[in-house]
Structures are given as C-alpha cells and as structure tokens.
Amino acid sequence: MSKKAILIICDGMGDRPVKEYDYKTPLETANTPNLNKLAEEGLVGLMDPISPGIRPGSDVAHLAILGYNPYECYAGRGSLEAAGAGIQLKPGDIAFRANFATVNEDLTIVDRRAGRIKTGIKELAEAINQIKIESVNGVSVEFYPTIEHRGVLIFRGEKLSKNVSDTDPHEIGVKPLKSKPLDDSIEAERMAKALNEFTEKSFHVLKNHQINLNRVKIGEKPANIILARGAGSYFKLKTFQEKYGIKTAAIAAVALVKGVCRIAGMEIIDVKGATGGLNTNFNGKADEAAKAIKHYDFVFLHVKATDVAGHDGNFKAKVEAIENIDKMIGRLIDQLDLNETYVTITADHCTPINFKDHSGDPVPILIHGPETFHSEIKKFCEKTASQGNLCRIKGIDIMAILTNYMGISEKFGY
Ligand SMILES: [Zn+2]
C-alpha cells in the first residue's frame, strides 16, 4: 500500500557559523526537541538546493525541490507571482511583480512600499487600470493588487518578451529605472517601451488621486507610482497528478511559493493568520496540514519566518522562528500516523544572518518515516547533517526519494 508524505520547507533556515554567537548557527542554538527526535529516527543529510555554491532564489529552489529542473522550466518571477495571486496567464502574456511606491515631485523614491499601504488600494488599482498603452500597438495592461503594497502587473498583446530589465531600482533615494531590452529582439524592445510608458502614466494617475491626497493630509506616504520587477512569461508544468498520480495540497502564505505550488497542480489551503512573517499562525499551519493529509497523498507546508529573520540579520529572531517551527512540528506529528506518513523537513536555501541574503551553502535535511534507517543524530543542525546517513543530495533528488519511499515511483528499465 502506498504511503503519504508531508514536505516542510523552512525558508532560508540554513546558516553559517556565527562568530558573535560562539560560532554556532541559529538552528544549532535553538531548542528543537521535535526536530531532534525526527532526525534521530530518520535520515539526515545535507541538500544543495540547485548545486554546490549556487545561490538560489526561492522560486527556482522550490521548483527544484518539487522535482522540476529550473534550468529547463523557469520563466521568471512574475509568472509565479501571478499564479500565486490566482491569475491565469495566457501564452504571450508578460507578468511582473509590482509595488506601490512613494516618489517625491522630482520622482526620487522615498519609500519602495508606500508606507505599506493598507487601505484605498482597490480605488487606486481602478485608476491604474484606466491606463492605455499608446506608444506600442496592440498592447494592454492590467494591474492586480494582492496584499498591502504588493501587486501583479500583466501586459497582454502580440510580440512581447520577458527579456527586459526592472523599473524597480531596489533602493531609495534614486529615481525609478528605465526598463531596457536585454536582447536585440523587437519583442523585448516593445515590452520595455510599454513598461516605461506605464510607469510614467502610473505616476500621473496616482499623484493627485483623492486617496493619496487624503493620505498626505494625515501624514501618510502617498502610493503614487508603480515599480515593476522580475518579468515572467506563461509556462506550464507537468502536475503532480500527471507525474505521480497523486492528490496534493499546499499550505503557504507567500505568493511566489503559492504560485509554484499552483502551477504544480496543488490545491492551495489558506490558513487564517498565516502572514508570511515572524508572527505567522504556526499552530494553524500544523492543524491544517494534519487535516489535509487525511484527504491528500502529499502535503507541502511552507514557513517564511526564518528567511525574514535571515534577511534582517537578526540571530535571536531566527532562533525564535526555528523554535516556533519546532513547536509547530510537534503539534503536527502528534496528529499524524507516523507508520503511514513520511515527514521531510529542510530549507530552500540558507539566508545567513551575517550575509542577509540567500547563499549557495547546502542546507540540512531530514526524512522521517516508517522505513527509514535511524541516523542516531541527537541534534538536527548544519554541522551534524554533514555526518548523517542521507549524505549529500540535491534539491531535484527529493521527490525521487520521497516517491520511492511512498511506493509510487516507476521502475527505470526492465
Ligand atoms: Zn526562500
């Protein structure tokens, strides 16, 4: 009989030895009785999300971990953001991750997140959606706000390419960038031109919008321009159902990760209070995952908090996030039949607190299940993982290993 599996990704959990904390990592420092128990009774090793030394974005790392070769299928961040927001792209569409931002009169960026705007977003989006692209024939634009300052921008029409640069400079005190074609194609040229026209027009429709005038009056930053980044094009993946014949669900708050899961054919389960932040609803995630595995063969569970702490360079917050994850896992496994279910816990990459960005180091991984050898490792962390019985694998190996244990993989050869 086939078994079930839960795959838990603690975003950016891996780290490097931190000098200021006695050369320990946050995972090594954290009190993690549940992770330790699963590690001791299961397989433990190191995992290179892509390949040793390659620094992955969360999008390509998740593609690899879910069994898709990102070098073959990755089509840019924007398309995953769109999928995460539940927007169906059509072949030919180009999607961008977009932000409401605040610029002053000479267009210098004051805040890339427009004071994390929370109200009036719908009205501002309606105004943006009146924008017509005139400099490029046959191209229309749609803006979909998602959460707070975030949104997805979609250009539709003939002859567009994702091969263009961002307008978002990723810093304040400078002006929005002009998008440039990144190759000699007419498609890239058309796309860059349309995006530049849109950016300029977004400022004109937003700067004197009543919502923004009101914001300024009460001392809040106006959301007076749209910045775009991460152009992506439509793409399709063979779903888990098509690949393995299994029913799958995903629990994730971050749009990018949701997008990967949705394109992989997973049912998205929303958890109340799941924020993608340090204060996310850990208990809710555990309970929903336990409930979901009764109805699905495979459940994917993502927690962003560890990555947030890593980007902030906050050791203590990362330790706390890991301890919260450990409690979440304890609550989850209490509700599982561990004779029927494989539980895998790893990260999609390291976000070392002294580097404050994704690094190319391997991450620790554990696989616990009814027929795994016991590693006998007492403490789950980066150091001990290198001594583990799973040795060193790549992200792309995980689904092969899990479907093998689940009893649903196909034999290669006769
Ligand atoms: Zn990540």
Image (cartoon, rainbow, N blue to C red):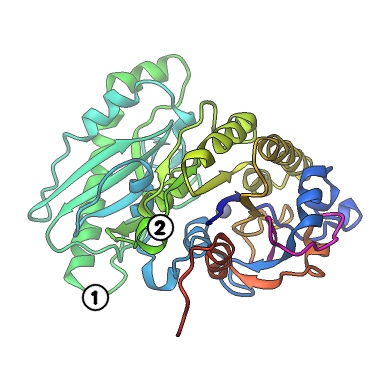
Quadrant containing the C terminus in the rendered view: bottom left
Inspect the image, locate mark 2, and give the three-letter code of the amino acid beneath it: Phe
Counting from the top left corner in percent of width and height, residue 182 is at 32, 70
Q: Residue furthest left?
A: 137
Above or below, 290 against 19 in this view is above
Gap in Å between the C-alphas at discs 2 and 1?
37 Å
The image shows residue 64, relative to residue 357, as above or below, that is: below
Question: Residue 371 location, x and y as percent?
Answer: 69, 61
Residue on which disc 2 sits: 240
Name the amino acid type tagged 1: Asp
Q: Does the segment drawn in magenta span residue 367? A: yes
> Residue 236: in sight, yes or no?
yes
Q: In terms of depth relative to the viewer, which is nearer, 160 or 15? A: 15
Q: Is residue 408 above or below residue 265?
A: below
Q: Nearer the viewer, residue 312 or 206?
A: 312
Q: Which residues are magenta?
A: 360-379
Pointer 2 or 1: first along the chain: 1
> Considering the numbered disc 1 on the image, is that residue within a helix, a strand or a loop?
loop
Q: Residue at x 64, y 63 (%)?
A: 359
Mark number for residue 184? 1
Residue 159 included in the magenta stretch of the image: no
